Image (spheres, rainbow, N blue to C red):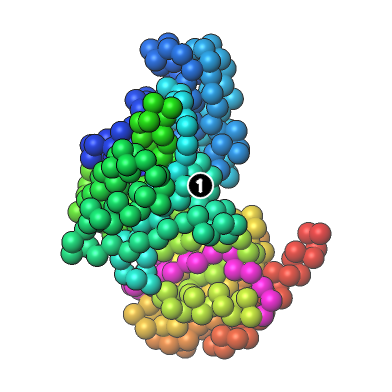
Amino acid sequence: MNIHEYQAKDILRKEGVPIPPGEVASTPAEVEAIAKQYGGTVVVKAQVHAGGRGKAGGVKLATSPAEAKEIASKILGMHIKGLPVQKVLVTPAADIASEAYVGIILDRASKKPVFMVSPAGGIDIEEVAAKTPEKILKLPVDTRYGLEPFQASRLAFFLFDDVKKVRAVAKIMQQLYSAFMKSGCSLAEINPLVTTPAGDVVALDAKMVIDDNELDRHPELAALRDESAEAPSEVLARNASLTFIKLDGNVGCVVNGAGLAMATMDLVKYYGGEPANFLDIGGSSNPEKVVNALKIITADPSVKAILFNIFGGITRTDDVANGIVTATKQNPLKVPIVIRLTGTNEEIAMKILHDNGFTASSDMDEAVKKAVELAKAAEGKAA
């Protein structure tokens, strides 16, 4: 679960991280009032779950309340990477002497939280990793002991030579690690972590991603979810208990089981296609899941063909067939559908589909190849 910058900052403030004050607004008039309260130059920052806000025009300096109001009127309502901006954070501008990056990510390979720090802050860490990897220091943390003081110092000395700053940054890293662990994060970062001309160290931006598996233990964090800032398809999938991830292809995949879903996407790629999504309807035998899955798939204009790949076990193929029939009666399909069913109640499922005008195969390769061909043909007609 992504949370907004202002929410992440509130969590880090509670741990003692030095962060400038800031207030959230949803109208230009509110922004003007906050800017008057702070006086001087302020920064108006779009609150949206997308990176690259600055490059998209979602972060602007304002030297007066009137200018802040004008800037807010342009940022509020704009779209950044397809997501609408409905809130902005207004915070006093800071004098910056240097910028650094400090972050923690849960690393599957080492099975540990890994600190990543870089003196090249203020830009995407992915860009730093690609162009100047020598500017990144990584350090896995043993959760039995936490971030040891000598480890924090080592990381801090990679960023600064001045001992006073090193001590301040090392303390901030301890606080960031504490917030990361308490909140059940998969990622927490400060970018940029800046020094001021006076030598102070301040966190100007913050990002946190909470592991969804932690939310039952942290209802106070679950309450921070902002569904209006998420892709509608992902909200619908989560509320329907479906595992869904949007991708950039044109073959919509509906599969039962994560392993089969991954194999299906690999096979789509193998036959020259591009999967439009990862969507797993497994875990139970419920036709309603199929109905909801098709609603999500058909709402994506990039999908040119739909592929069902079901290996029936707990998920019965006749329930999937009934779900397909129900869904297509409610909302007739505008793109071709390819169905592969095998497993529990396969003969019943095939009859249900045949009686309702559908054809289905039990051969996975055959079905995937056909779906890719249909998607390519549709793209060709559109061109």
Name the magenta segment's main secondary structure. Answer: loop
Q: Is residue 281 magenta?
A: yes
Report whether 192 appears left or right of 56: left
Residue 383 visible in the current orientation: yes
Quadrant of the frame with the C terminus: bottom right
Q: Residue at x 54, y 23 (%)?
A: 61
Q: Residue at x 46, y 62 (%)?
A: 244
Q: Compared with residue 241, is residue 169 higher up or lower down, i.e. above or below?
A: above
Q: Position of residue 2 (x, y in %)?
A: 39, 48
User: Mark 1 packing: few (<14 Cα in 10 Å), some, or many (20+)?
Assistant: some
Report whether 13 appears left or right of 104: left
Q: Residue at x 40, y 56 (%)?
A: 116
Residue 328 visible in the current orientation: no
Q: Compare residues 245 and 355 and report the one nearer the observer.
A: 245
Q: Is residue 183 magenta?
A: no
User: Given the current orientation, which residue lies at the most extreme front position?
Assistant: 162
Q: Position of residue 298 (x, y in %)?
A: 58, 58
Dot 1 amino acid type: Ala
Q: Quadrant of residue 201?
A: top left
Label 1 residue SS: loop
Q: Position of residue 119 (x, y in %)?
A: 47, 47
> From which residue to which does the magenta span run?
271-289
Q: Compare residues 313 and 94 and report the one nearer the observer.
A: 94
Q: Compare residues 312 and 232 and report the one nearer the observer.
A: 232
Q: Badge 1 is on which residue?
A: 120
Q: Quadrant of residue 17?
A: top left
Report whether 177 appears left or right of 2: left
Q: Position of residue 111 (x, y in %)?
A: 31, 69
